[in-house]
Amino acid sequence: MAPDWKAAERYLLASARFGRRPGLHRIRALLERLGNPHLAVPHVIHVGGTNGKGSVVACLDAVLRSAGLRVARFTSPHLHHFCERIAVDGRPIEAGRLAHLLLDVVAPAAEAVAADLGDPPVTFELLTAAMYLHCRDLKVPWLVQEVGLGGRCDATNVVPRPAAVVITNVDLDHTRRLGATVEAIAAEKAGIIKPGAPVITAARGAALEQVARAARRAGAPLAVVTPEPDQAAGAAGAEPGTAVRYYRWQALEVGAGGGRFRLSDPAGCRREFTVALPGEYQLENAAVAAAVVDQLRYGPAARPAAGLDDAALAAGLCSVRWPGRMTLVPGEPPVLLDAAHNEAGMRALRRGVERLFPGRAVALVVGATADRDAAGLLRPWAQAAVSCAAVTVASGRAVPAEDLARHARDLGLPAAACGDLESALAQARRDLRRAGEGLVVVAGSILLVAEVLRRLPAPAQDALREVPVPAPS
């Protein structure tokens, strides 16, 4: 009889008690017992960074599928179900299939590893192993995988020679695990760079210097994606021996349904693209994805693929979907959902709100987990929101609503601790009635965004779901 998904879910949740422990020894031992399935995928694009990883993965997945290529996608966390994390050709893995891989295949190997090492594999490692098995069994030639946490010690950091390495950007996040400075965090994230594999990054300043240094040590070609006017020129090139190619992007149009940008490549060729993801920060993520595709096609370590051309690039970017990022739910007042979960993400969200909804009052509904800087999370909204309704998210690691509200008040932001999401949304609506035309912004944790989405009527949920990108006719 096929394994029950509920049993698999209990297995994953039970393994979570082991926490997140650094090191690659467990995942390597686990994969070896499983026959090293990660080595069976010919082309792997490895995406790390602080913010925008999932969006870049979604863009690349859409572009590769638009080129008619078979591609797997591995992301985390999920919005509603663990199955969302593993998708092939745009379709999440079936629950029965994932249950079989976890309980019948991965679990026995994990028990053996725990006995050998005295150190049981953790949840993310179990899912990573299942993902590689799924890719191997389906003979998927392309995989776009997102780093879970950090980079150097992340379970995904086992592919010896990726087709490309992406570091979206670097900012302060997970400081207790990754380091207290941007430089230290950048060094951890640059740990996914491999010898000869092209590196594409939108990192800037001191973080870019760390990425460039790691690329030079690995003999890896480096491409830097930067906005016009160029704010990064010279930073990477200051590192002797680093050959740098620059891609410069410029926002042409930003709207609630997406945007348009111009990309200048290292040769000075200019192209314009439309991306179906709202928010200016998504234009940068799309520009990073476009630079990755260029490096796959023309770069020093190019891996040409039939159909991967400008037409596929344009089709993928204008069709990509990534729910829970600047997702607008119509109503009076409208509600904007975003998975921003750190100070840098909240700054980007605030800029997006100010550009898309100028002059509107903002009532913030926020929840967070304990591995976040709660005060930093709220700081970008201190002068930009009329109020904050804090809620305790459904997690054993949640920051209590009372603590979030206290941090908000310390920043001068009127705040209330609410017992649940419904009362937080009601509080936000009351605050907006006093302020005039407004917008409710829900952010701070993907768990909170998912809870709002689950409460929507079925037709509204269907309209916001990811739409698979059709292969070209």
Image (cartoon, rainbow, N blue to C red):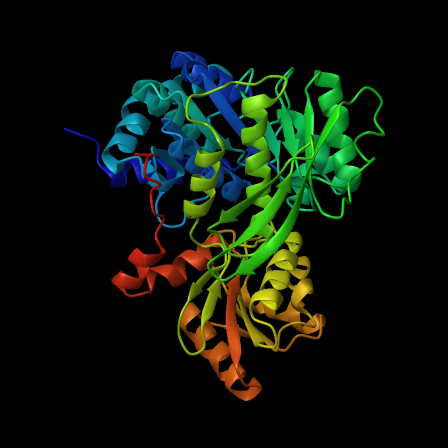
Q: State whether residue 38 is above or below residue 377.
A: above
Q: Quadrant of residue 272?
A: top right
Residue 51, visible in the rendered structure = no
Residue 42, visible in the rendered structure = yes
Quadrant of the snapshot with the C terminus: top left
Quadrant of the snapshot with the N terminus: top left
Of all residues, the one furthest to the front in this rendering is 269
Q: Quadrant of residue 243?
A: top right
Q: Nearer the viewer, residue 274 or 29?
A: 274
Tell me: 199 left or right of 110. Answer: right
Question: What residue sits 50% from the left and 48% below the top?
Answer: 274
Question: What residue sits 85% from the left and 22% below the top?
Answer: 240
Q: Nearer the viewer, residue 340 or 141?
A: 141
Tell me: 147 left or right of 263. Answer: left
Q: Quadrant of residue 471?
A: top left
Q: Nearer the viewer, residue 303 or 426?
A: 303
Q: Nearer the viewer, residue 156 or 103?
A: 156
Where residue 364 sits: x, y (%)? 55, 70
Where residue 344 sits: x, y (%)? 66, 53
